[in-house]
Image (spheres, helix red, strand yellow):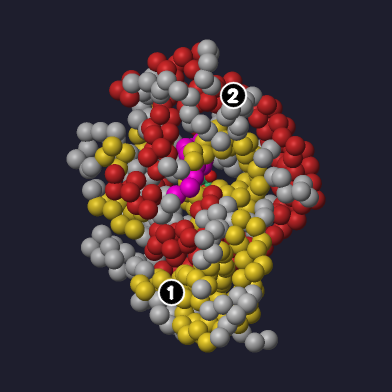
Amino acid sequence: MAERIVLNTDIRKGKIDRNIYGHFAEHLGRCIYEGIWVGEDSPIPNTKGIRNDVVEALKEMKIPVLRWPGGCFADEYHWKDGIGPSEERKRMINTHWGGAVENNHFGTHEFMLLCAMLECEPYINGNVGSGTVQEMSEWVEYLTFNGVSPMAELRQKNGQEEAWSVTYFGVGNENWGCGGNMRPEYYADLYRQYQTYVRNYGDNKIHRIACGANADDYNWTEVLMREATRFMDSLTLHYYTLPTSDWANKGAATGYGTDEYFNTLKKALFMDELVTRHSVIMDKYDPEKRVGLIVDEWGTWYDVEPGTNPGFLYQQNTIRDALVAGLTLNIFHKHSDRVRMANIAQTVNVLQAVILTEGEKMLLTPTYHVFNMYKVHQDAELLELTVDSPVYSYEGVEIPEVSASASVTAEGVIHVSLCNLNHAAPAVLPLELRGLAGQSATVSGTTLAGASIDAHNTFEQPEAVKPQAFNAFKLEGDTLTVELPPMSVTVLAITPK
Ligand code: AHR
């Protein structure tokens, strides 16, 4: 088969929900504290305690939705600990994550302020594992009820007169594991019960999210869909990419060899199979595709940086992570009929973060640049595209060298995102532009490439990996021949004229 990409510019396949570009911030390590929240008295420039530099960077990237407060922390979090005068809030140990002191200074009001500053949707994850139905129900009342009620009065006493608008609400997290070690049958029943009291107040309509499977636990999806489809708006899926198969020795975030580089990308590509197979089960119970699949935890997970708290999950981020981000977002686009949201873990200083901080310093990771380059796809129409990819092989194992996706904006600009996974060779292949009906086009591009297999940004060299103008293409008739650098993520803008 000829190696090529065929793009049907006139075949639209539905909207790519902007929420696929969502993020996740947990009370874990230095994500919330230091990474987002520094407190009003900090010398780091902030607005009501929230870092200005981080907010600006996330806004630039057009963060659409932010999930909080966990993760595993969600099923240990009691929201009333995080409201009222901050000096009176409980101090406690975050037993799950590194034994850090949790002073509860970042709570509901601070999270809602953060989302307002980011102009993004809040996605709040409630506590099923160690919380009560009443506690969850009252949180929703506190957040969204405008009227006479104990929770509305408490919110007003704490300085927020008007109810907030909250759409996305998760009923538990990883209830098959840290959220209570439940069997799917048991969780399905609890989900039905808890969600009953997640009320819609006034015009606020909650999108109820049930806890879904761990990676390839297809039975979990089967049971949840069989028992609870009519009570949910979305079901989640969690999948992390590790270079090895050993959680005790996952592999380092930098300084790895070709074997771990290759294996990481191969394992990231597994997301396609996962989403496909979970979708097949969902189709059986929900052929109309009313229920969304939300991949609300995904990304790379390596050994922590040497000398850091193992419970803080702090890791560097390289061109390998950029490729994982690029190819995974391309996979989500392909499945956008079912995948309505995804939340990479975790926004700042934890796992595959888009931002790292050190005191007042902040850097943008290669993953950030991919999200920023890809933001043109948010809410755009997916276009039909097929890739007959060259093969990328390493020690007898083969994966596709090129991952690609395309969309068109309301203004008619076509964007094509292309990843060349090969660590050593450029990918040269034709991109056939079909359906332009004789129109010519102007083309421009941006690329993010790695000068070495673990190219990354440091606080000393924060711009070692950054997007550059991309000119290695030639348009002849309807064929655009591209030469993608080794280890690169490229976005082309094609404007028919
Ligand atoms: O993102 C880190 C942890 O990974 C989350 O708290 C948990 O949900 C998952 O296991």
Name which residue lies at 49% across and 41% down. 121
Residue occupying the point 65% across, 57% down: 14
Residue annotated with mark 1: 444
Residue 407 on the magenta span: no
Amino acid type shown at disc 1: Ser
Residue 449 shows in the view: no
Front residue of 497/337: it is 497
391 sits to left or right of 77:
right
Task: Give residue 136's position: percent from left, percent from top.
Answer: 57, 26
Secondary element type, mark 2: loop
In the image, residue 221 sits, relative to residue 405, either above or below, namely above
Where on the picture, by quarter, is residue 479? bottom right
Instruction: Identify the residue shown where x is 61% and y is 55%.
Output: 15
Nearer-the-camera pick, 230 or 215: 230
Residue 308 appears left or right of 193: left
**Residue 296 appears at what percent x and percent y?**
56, 48
Is residue 168 among the parts visible in the rendering?
yes
Kindly identify which numbered label has been placed on residue 98: none
Q: Residue furthest left?
A: 43
In this rendering, the label closer to the viewer, 1 or 2? 1
The tally of labels here is: 2
Residue holding disc 2: 201
Q: Are marks 1 and 2 in contact (CB under 8 Å)?
A: no
Which residue: 43% across, 51% down? 62
Q: Position of residue 311 (x, y in %)?
A: 41, 46
Above/below status of 87 relative to 255: above
Q: Quadrant of the rendered structure where residue 451 is?
A: bottom left
Segment colored magenta: 63-75
Give the amino acid at mark 2. Tyr
- Percent position of residue 301, x then y: 48, 57
CA–CA distance in space, label 1 to label 2:
48 Å
First in sequence: mark 1 vs mark 2: 2
